[in-house]
């Protein structure tokens, strides 16, 4: 099993999207890349902690590659917009890829370099070594399953059928 942390705007949609994909074993939403210890959602929303809303993925690299995960991420974000996705605006909604394994850094950078050819503007997705990840409050975990009519900037129906876990087909 491997781990990667992704930020793509509001973490509710990112988690709901990735938990449906074959090879993703576990998802958890939280806060990363900030300046305070164990922030609350309210503190993160002020923008003063500089944390980003993120989703930690545990995945089976024998089933899904990091590159495929990145393709999925880029299908649900606009990687050229800084500090905004959908209607969500602020530094906590910036996009990012936070790796644990040093060998993943080059895969990520190569992927972004190839993707840049598809965009006129520069890709502004952060790529950093993972720092501390703080779990979001229980209320936010698996939010869109608990609240199916909740706001989501991510189109959950964009996942190709062949990539869906059986229970989501």
Image (cartoon, helix red, strand yellow):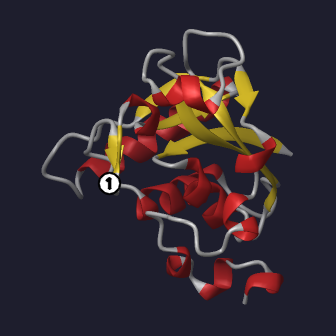
Q: Label 1, on which residue?
A: 78
Compare residues 98 and 110 and report the one nearer the observer. 98
Q: Is mark 1 on a helix, strand or loop?
A: loop
| Relative image position of residue 55 (x, y in whole percent) | 65, 44
Q: How crowded is mark 1: few (under 14 residues within 10 Å), some or many (20 or more)?
A: some
Tell me the residue at 51%/49% (across/down): 10
| Relative image position of residue 131 (x, y in whole percent) | 65, 17
| Residue sticking out furthest to the front | 42
| Residue sticking out furthest to the left | 120
Tell me the residue at 50%/64% (across/down): 152
| Relative image position of residue 34 (x, y in whole percent) | 55, 17
Compare residues 146 and 119 and report the one nearer the observer. 146
Compare residues 25 and 162 and report the one nearer the observer. 25
Q: Quadrant of the C terminus?
A: bottom right
Left/right of residue 157 with respect to residue 59 in the rendered view: left
Q: Count of labels shown? A: 1
Q: Is residue 27 above or below residue 22?
A: above
Q: Is residue 85 above or below residue 42?
A: below
Tell me the residue at 33%/36% (across/down): 83
Tell me the residue at 65%/74% (across/down): 148
Q: Is residue 25 above or below residue 88?
A: below
Compare residues 62 and 131 and report the one nearer the observer. 131
| Relative image position of residue 99 (x, y in whole percent) | 63, 30
Residue 94 found in image quarter? top left
């Amino acid at each position: 099993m491997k781990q990667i942390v992704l930020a793509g705007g509001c973490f509710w949609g990112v988690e709901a999207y990735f938990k449906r994909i074959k090879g993703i074993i576990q998802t958890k939403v939280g806060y990363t890349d900030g300046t305070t210890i164990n922030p609350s959602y309210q503190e993160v929303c002020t923008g003063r902690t500089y944390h980003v809303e993120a989703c930690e993925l545990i995945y089976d690299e024998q089933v899904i590659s990091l590159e495929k995960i990145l393709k999925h991420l880029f299908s649900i974000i606009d990687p050229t917009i800084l500090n905004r996705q959908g209607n969500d605006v602020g530094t906590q909604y910036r996009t990012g890829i936070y790796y644990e394994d040093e060998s993943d850094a080059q895969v990520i950078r190569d992927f972004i370099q190839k993707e840049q050819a598809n965009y006129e503007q520069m890709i502004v997705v952060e790529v950093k070594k993972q720092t501390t990840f703080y779990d979001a409050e229980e209320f936010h975990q698996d939010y869109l399953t608990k609240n199916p009519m909740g706001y989501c900037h991510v189109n959950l129906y964009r996942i190709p059928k062949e990539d869906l876990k059986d229970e989501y087909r």
